[in-house]
Image: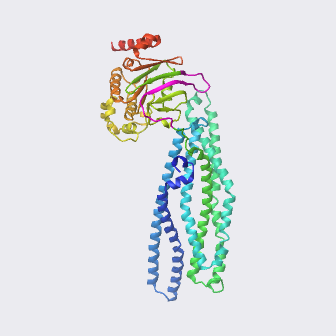
């Protein structure tokens, strides 16, 4: 079964980390089997002490036994260290894998349209963390509870199987109680998570709209509403924590009731009147072994609650982990001509923004797209990257695009009219994880000298959204990123809005060289470069008029008027 089919199954995440789990299994068995040696050493040390006081043993024998005990403890604890180290690695890898799957699927689904984004992300990430924690505890306790309990039980049966069966009547009661409380635990944990999501959404809403509330005198009312959300969360969180964390001591107390039976019948064994003949070492070993087993029993009951809690979260996020189904390819990138045929687009519930759009382009061509405000220029560009559904056909060679989101990555590069930079270095924002030399693209967008003047050069951290850069620098860094990741089709939405005319001309000349093996759709409201375009698309009243610059100047008066106005403004500015 491949990853695409398995990401919504728990087994997939365990199989993915099978080698780490193999190390966990080896170290876990060695550690927990070795734990059973503790009661044996404790019992024999008590026996040696009694023998030394009675004169039948020497202190040196006690010292040798103590040294063997110390070495055993050292080995066992080292195995424990290795087991915990690799269990943590297992949990970290699972968390990364699960969250990457969630983020990817959310990006390629319209889930945020059904629920507030803040509430959804809070619940999903919180539930993912709960699932990972449950898987970590399960992996840990399989060995720290399961294997060690088997070891302790085997030792108890070896010393006195009748007394073992009698004293072991109590731990199952703790398990039964934990199972009976399953519904209560699940219910309260679910209510706590829902309240936490509502509180997060209320916090986000309060911060976002604080100014509006203050202006319209509603700040006090919103404060009361927020306090209600906070109080509700506190109550539900406390109730959930009580049921989850207050019960383990009770489980342990129930399990320890068997100690009373051991003292009574074990004492008879020591005096030779019981089911077995014991010395002090046997009694101490048996009692210590049962005591440790009882403690582990309480942890086993706690593990049930942890798994139940994780199961609630797993059921909530499982739909978001299911792989996004992709339609089969209708072709491959065997050619390079772009063909747009009878494309129509309308936002839900509205009239078409544009209809029956058709044009074609060949490799090496730069197509200028322009028109009045809100005519659909940017929307036309987004159709090619799978952001919006449409009617009609768009193809690149033999490959026919459709609204599939991630199907576009191999064929189309996109630069939106907002730069969308993240809080990293200039190099990281351009490379996006693909190593290489960025100096050529910095020169292509005429920002190389400015970057070299920064204290850290290309390693300068630009802040969230590129806040440490000017608007023109932000736009050119984003353009450099698009050129660095060249594709057969390049969509550049208003790349020159924040640069001067001379810089615009130089960058355009460089783009012409850089994209000689690509098709460029250059969306812009500035027409100074449009005479140099191979084609021009003028969008107006839901229609698209295609032709070269000279043809549109002759046949389309609105295009001609806009171009003449901008040319006159540019000339006046130069003068």
In front: 230, or 24?
24
In front: 19, or 185?
19
Is residue 333 placed above or below 170 in the rendered structure?
above
Figure quadrant of residue 302: bottom right
Quadrant assignment for the C terminus: top left
Is residue 366 placed above or below 146 in the rendered structure?
above
Percent across and percent down for residue 560 are 43, 12
In front: 554, or 529?
554
Colour mapping: rainbow
Q: Which residues are magenta?
A: 329-355
Q: Residue furthest bottom?
A: 55
Which residue occupies 56% across, 47% down?
126
Is residue 411 placed above or below 354 in the rendered structure?
below
Percent across and percent down for residue 500 are 36, 22
Q: Is residue 168 magenta?
A: no
Figure quadrant of residue 370: top left
Left or right of 96 on screen, residue 528: left
Q: Which SS does the magenta portion mostly show?
A: loop
Left or right of 239 on screen, residue 440: left
Q: Is residue 351 magenta?
A: yes
Which residue occupies 58% across, 84% down?
279
Left or right of 73 on screen, residue 567: left
Percent across and percent down for residue 260 are 66, 75
Percent across and percent down for residue 505 are 34, 22
Figure quadrant of residue 247: bottom right
In front: 212, or 9?
9
Q: From where the camera sits, is residue 395 visible?
A: yes
Number of disc labels: 0
Is residue 218 placed above or below 574 in the rendered structure?
below
Q: From where the camera sits, is residue 565 visible?
A: no
């Amino acid at each position: 079964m491949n990853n695409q089919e398995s990401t919504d199954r728990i087994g997939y995440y365990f199989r993915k980390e099978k080698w780490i789990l193999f190390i966990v299994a080896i170290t876990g068995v060695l550690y927990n089997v070795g734990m059973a040696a503790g009661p044996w050493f404790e019992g024999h040390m008590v026996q040696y002490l009694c023998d030394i006081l009675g004169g039948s043993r020497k202190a040196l024998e006690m010292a040798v036994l103590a040294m063997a005990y110390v070495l055993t403890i050292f080995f066992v604890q080292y195995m424990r260290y290795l087991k915990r180290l690799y269990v943590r690695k297992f949990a970290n890898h699972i968390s990364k894998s699960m969250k990457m799957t969630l983020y990817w699927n959310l990006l390629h689904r319209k889930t945020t349209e059904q629920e507030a984004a803040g509430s959804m992300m809070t619940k999903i990430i919180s539930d993912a963390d709960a699932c990972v924690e449950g898987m970590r505890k399960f992996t840990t306790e399989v060995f720290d509870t399961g294997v060690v309990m088997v070891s302790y039980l085997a030792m108890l049966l070896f010393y006195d199987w009748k007394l073992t069966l009698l004293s072991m009547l109590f731990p199952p009661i703790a398990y039964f109680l934990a199972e009976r409380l399953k519904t209560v635990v699940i219910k309260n944990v679910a209510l706590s998570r829902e309240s936490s999501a509502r509180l997060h959404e209320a916090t986000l809403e309060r911060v976002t709209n604080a100014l509006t509330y203050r202006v319209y005198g509603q700040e006090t009312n919103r404060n009361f509403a927020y306090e209600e959300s906070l109080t509700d969360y506190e109550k539900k969180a406390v109730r959930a924590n009580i049921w989850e964390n207050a019960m383990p001591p009770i489980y342990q107390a129930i399990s320890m009731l068997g100690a009373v039976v051991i003292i009574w019948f074990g004492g008879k064994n020591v005096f030779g009147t019981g089911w077995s003949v014991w010395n002090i070492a046997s009694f101490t070993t048996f009692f210590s072994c049962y005591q440790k087993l009882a403690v582990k029993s309480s942890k086993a009951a706690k593990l049930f609650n942890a798994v139940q809690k994780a199961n609630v979260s797993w059921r909530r996020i499982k739909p978001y982990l299911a792989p996004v189904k992709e339609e089969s390819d209708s072709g491959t990138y065997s050619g390079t001509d772009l063909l747009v045929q009878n494309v129509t687009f309308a936002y839900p519930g509205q009239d078409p923004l544009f209809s029956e759009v058709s044009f074609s382009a060949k490799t090496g061509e730069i197509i200028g797209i322009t028109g009045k405000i809100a005519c659909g220029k940017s929307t036309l560009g987004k159709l090619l990257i799978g952001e919006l559904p449409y009617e009609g056909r768009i193809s690149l060679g033999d490959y026919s695009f459709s609204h599939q989101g991630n199907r576009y990555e191999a064929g189309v590069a996109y630069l939106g009219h907002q730069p969308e930079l993240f809080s990293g270095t200039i190099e990281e924002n351009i490379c996006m994880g693909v190593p290489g030399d960025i100096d050529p693209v910095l020169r292509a967008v005429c920002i190389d000298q400015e970057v070299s003047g920064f204290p850290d050069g290309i390693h300068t951290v630009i802040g969230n959204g590129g806040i440490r850069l000017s608007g023109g620098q932000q736009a050119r860094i984003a353009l450099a990123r698009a050129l660095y990741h060249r594709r057969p089709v390049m969509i550049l939405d208003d790349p020159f809005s924040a640069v001067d005319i001379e810089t615009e001309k130089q960058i355009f000349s460089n783009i012409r060289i850089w994209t000689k093996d690509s098709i460029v759709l250059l969306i812009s409201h500035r027409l100074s470069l449009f005479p140099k375009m191979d084609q021009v698309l003028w969008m107006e009243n839901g229609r698209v008029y295609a032709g070269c610059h000279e043809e549109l100047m002759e046949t389309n008066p609105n295009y001609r008027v806009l171009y003449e106005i901008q040319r006159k403004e540019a000339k006046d500015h130069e003068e």
